[in-house]
């Protein structure tokens, strides 16, 4: 049985986690499904943006209990292989060539926090709760940590990694883990508002900007980085899309991708 479904509409691919009966918790099957889904939509020329959503009262409750029961008997090598698949899923989401937006309608726990953090943007319902609960069962949020720390910052991570406290959507917004908070009835309206500028921007420029953030974030400002940014703007300025965008701006007309 598939753990998710994908729909396409007007340039937007929507990947929806579809196991509400287990609060969309992870399993090895779900991890494989999510990885393949992002590879699929990322490769489609007609997709300009990707929304990651979920059915039911929870966005993602972390690891599925049956999967955890199997992992309890794994050897260290088996655990390494298993964690590697989760890490690859997060990498594929983070490096998806299309902009990604998490639509968080409900609670997010443990590994589910990695799903939200790996997306470029996140919008949460004001009733959603968040929790890095791993320490409560003697574990650590290791695999998701590169993405979660980038999303909330080291200072907030020190607190919430160590305490395993649950925090609400307002706090998630305050620390930068989510970009916007909306009432449950206004969540889709807020998602659409964030999608609108993505759909009107130059597709190649959006892809290049996403890669720019990945390449530049957290790096020391040194000659190599500066040279790379110079090369990056020179390349995009000389591209067909870059030339068309500038000419359209100067001519006060719509660029070809909006015509």
Image (spheres, grey):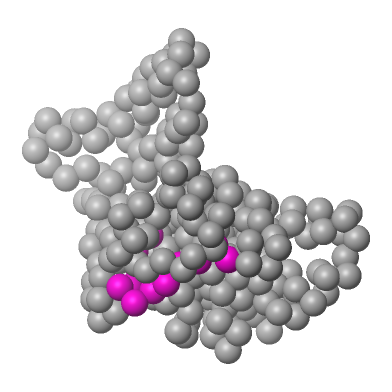
Q: Quadrant of residue 249?
A: top left
Left or right: where 4 falls relative to 122: right
Please provide percent x and percent y for residue 47. Answer: 43, 58
For the N terminus, the quadrant is: bottom right
How many labels, in total?
Answer: 0
Q: Position of residue 187 (x, y in %)?
A: 29, 73
Where residue 188 sits: x, y (%)?
29, 73
Residue drawn at (12%, 42%) of the image: 253
Residue 45 visible in the snapshot: no
> Which residue is pictured at 88% across the width and 65% down the height?
74
Please say whether residue 77 is visible from this viewpoint: yes
Which one is nearer the viewer's eye here, 180 or 12?
Answer: 180
**Along the viewing direction, whichever of 157 and 207 lies nearer the viewer:** 157
- Toward the top, the furthest residue is 223
**184 lies left or right of 135:** left
The question of residue 100 being in magenta is answered with no
Q: In the image as oriented, which residue stretches furthest toward the front?
A: 163
Residue most toward the left?
252
Q: Name the residue located 34 percent from the left edge and 67 percent from the top edge.
A: 169
Quarter-of-image position of residue 238? top left
Residue at 47% x, 42% y is 154
Asked if the stretch drawn in magenta spans residue 126, the answer is yes
Question: Between residues 258 and 227, which one lies in front from this camera angle?
Answer: 227
Q: Is residue 6 above or below residue 225?
A: below
On screen, residue 174 versus residue 44, left or right, reads left
Q: Could you tell me what secondary structure mostly forms the magenta stretch?
A: strand
Q: Position of residue 258 (x, y in %)?
A: 24, 51
Numbered range of the magenta stretch = 121-133
């Amino acid at each position: 049985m598939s753990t998710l479904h994908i729909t396409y509409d007007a340039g937007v691919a929507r990947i929806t986690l579809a196991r509400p009966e287990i609060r969309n918790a992870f399993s090895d099957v779900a991890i494989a499904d999510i990885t393949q889904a992002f590879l699929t939509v990322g490769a489609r020329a007609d997709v300009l943006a990707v929304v990651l959503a979920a059915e039911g009262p929870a966005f993602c409750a972390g690891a599925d209990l049956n999967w955890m029961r199997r992992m309890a008997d794994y050897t260290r090598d088996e655990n390494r292989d298993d964690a590697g698949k989760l890490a690859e899923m997060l990498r594929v989401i983070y490096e998806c060539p299309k902009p990604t937006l998490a639509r968080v309608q409900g609670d997010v726990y443990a590994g589910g926090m990695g799903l939200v953090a790996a997306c470029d943007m996140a919008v949460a319902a004001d009733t959603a709760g968040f929790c890095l609960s791993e320490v409560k069962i003697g574990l650590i949020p290791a695999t998701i940590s590169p993405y979660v720390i980038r999303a909330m910052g080291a200072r907030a991570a020190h607190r919430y990694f160590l305490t395993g406290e649950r925090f609400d959507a307002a706090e998630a917004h305050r620390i930068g883990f989510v970009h916007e908070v909306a009432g449950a009835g206004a969540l889709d309206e807020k998602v659409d508002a964030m999608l609108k500028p993505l759909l009107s921007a130059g597709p190649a420029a959006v892809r290049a900007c996403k890669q720019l953030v990945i390449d530049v974030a957290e790096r020391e400002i040194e000659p190599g980085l500066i040279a790379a940014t110079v090369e990056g703007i020179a390349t995009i300025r000389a591209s067909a899309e870059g030339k068309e965008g500038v000419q359209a701006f100067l001519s006060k007309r719509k660029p070809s991708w909006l015509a």
